Amino acid sequence: MKDTKFNYKNIPGWGMDADPENEPTYPMKTWTGDDHNRINYERADQQPIDLEILLSTERPAPTRVFGNTVPPSGLSGVIRRYAFSHSEDRYRHWIPLILADRINMVEGVVKDISEGYLPNIAAERGWRVEWKYKPKKMALKVGIVAVAGLYLFLKLKSTKKKRWYHQLI
Amino acid sequence: MLAMNYRGPYRIRTEQRPMPEILHPEDAIIRVTRSCICGSDLHLYHGMVPDTRVGSTFGHEFTGIVEEVGPLVQKLKVGDQVLVPFNVACGRCNFCKQGLYGNCHESNPMATAVGGIFGYSHTAGGYAGGQAEYVRVPYADVGPTVIPADMDPDDAVLLTDVVPTGYQAAEMGGIKQGDTVVIFGAGPIGIMAARCAWFFGPSRVIIIDHIDYRLEFAKNYAHCEAYNFKDMEDPVVFLKKTTDWYGADVCIDCVGCEAEGNTLQTFSGRIMLMQSGAGTALQWAINSVKKGGIVSIVGVYGPPFNLIPIGNVVNKGITIRANQASVKRLLPKLIDHVQSGRLNPKGLITHRVPLEEVADAYRLFSSKLDNCIKTVLIPSTKS
């Protein structure tokens, strides 16, 4: 609680070296002194809050407008809600958000398929233009993926055979 | 309506979406006529920005025609052709009132570290972006600016971000007549910063990058010296040497979190995500600037932290100045520069792509194919 009885202006030398020209934010900021009024400024009407928005713990009141594009949902939503229980200062805010983004990507594929839509990964990743302008690099990438895939396939196949053989013995 | 749809790192497509609606009495609905892909959109595309949700629509550089306005909107009317600054700003909070429109306190409930930005993840407010046929624009009396009748629409769309950000990068450098200015990054922002630096009277403007076609473009467009850091053993030593072993007066970081050139920074920042991307350009800026010099940062970094030589900042007495561009504050001056012919923003545009081909456009820009500098998306509903 602010001590209203204390008058800091009575401190010897208060303000005597203040230099209004010493303003490193000029010309980006037109200093008015309003910062000292903190959040006591005129506000717009509040946008109706008819969906879940996650609020930063560093400013618990919602802003007067906000985006309403993708409310949190699913497992990624659970992780996002956890992340927003911590301040922006903490890694436990940002790392879970990145984790949630990656899980959200898988959720997106599952949702597409469940709705009968098979994502065209090649088109979504813009491989057509990559092929057009850098065919050698693209061919190399495809080759590496194909070789790695074939190796994994054969490796899994041989592992399965060994297990089957061992079971017979 | 057709809109770009993010599906995960390096995966996007276009999809039919519901039309945006007026959600607040100060909203407007804009029919998009042009929308650019920004270098900072690539950080989203690459999955580097936390809380980028699947289903989001990107795009913070766009122009359009006003289709509908909320009951409290007074300055715009249906049919106005407008350019929309990338910042969502209320115009009333203390930050807006002092000209810091990029730091509005009433546009982003999800983070205090950044103001609201169109189409830039939920970390920046969760707003739908302009890479769509229509977009909702809050605080329509504050940001959107009617495009002057004689202005080329391609110039107008670049006034929403590229030109103000490049200009403010130079402005924050506090450039004095005769100064040597070094700019890291020859992307659209770096090139524009190099061009705008001349407005402040330096004697040398040097741009550093590793992509030859961009350096060549920068040299011609911004009349600056251009050097490839891959041709140097050590860019910091090179810059010290070329400034008589003194250091540059001003260094400007226009690269941000996806810098190349330092293995440790790349590994820890871009591959392992142990920091908010690679701080290579900022490290070079701090180490290349003179004692008592100024480092200006407009490159985009993520929220947690970066490994930079802060001890050198203290010991060299460096002033660091940084911010998102305050587009609204700068627009009157920049519109004048464009209309008088001193600035030619549309000269940056190398590719015009239909919105339907947004995935190809992102790949083109991300992989730096076909000598791409700046891509503009054109929705079929533009006219």
Image (spheres, coloured by chain):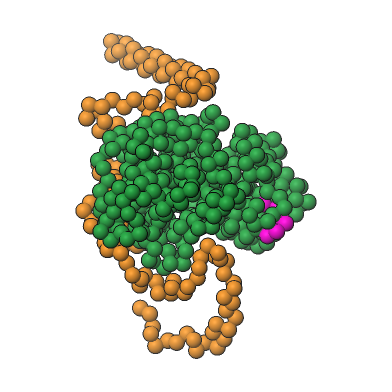
Chain colours: A orange, B green
Q: Is residue B362 magenta?
A: no
- Which percent across, then down, holds residue B26? 30, 58
Q: Quadrant of the N terminus of chain A?
A: bottom left
Q: Residue at x 63, y 44 (%)?
A: B222
Nearer to us in this view, B256 or B156:
B156
Instruction: Describe residue A88's horizontal placement relative to residue A117 as left or right.
Output: right
- Please tell me which residue is depicted at 35% across the width and 34% down the height of the picture: B380
Horizontal and vertical percent position of residue A107: 28, 35
Q: Nearer the viewer, residue B351 or A161?
A: B351
Is residue A91 visible in this depiction of the protein? no
Give the image location of residue B299, x and y in percent.
53, 48
Q: Quadrant of residue B229?
A: top right
Residue stretch in magenta: B176-181
Residue B366 or B357: which is nearer the viewer?
A: B357
Main SS of the magenta segment? Answer: loop
Residue lying farthest front?
B150
What residue is drawn where x is 48% and y is 36%?
A: B375
On screen, residue A115 versus residue B261, left or right, reads: left
Between B311 and A50, the one lying in front of the other is A50
In this rendering, the answer to whether B238 lies above or below B70 is above
Residue drawn at (25%, 33%), measured in percent from left and top?
A: A111
Asked whether the viewer can see residue B151, the reply is yes
* Residue B60, horizontal then vertical, whole percent: 41, 46
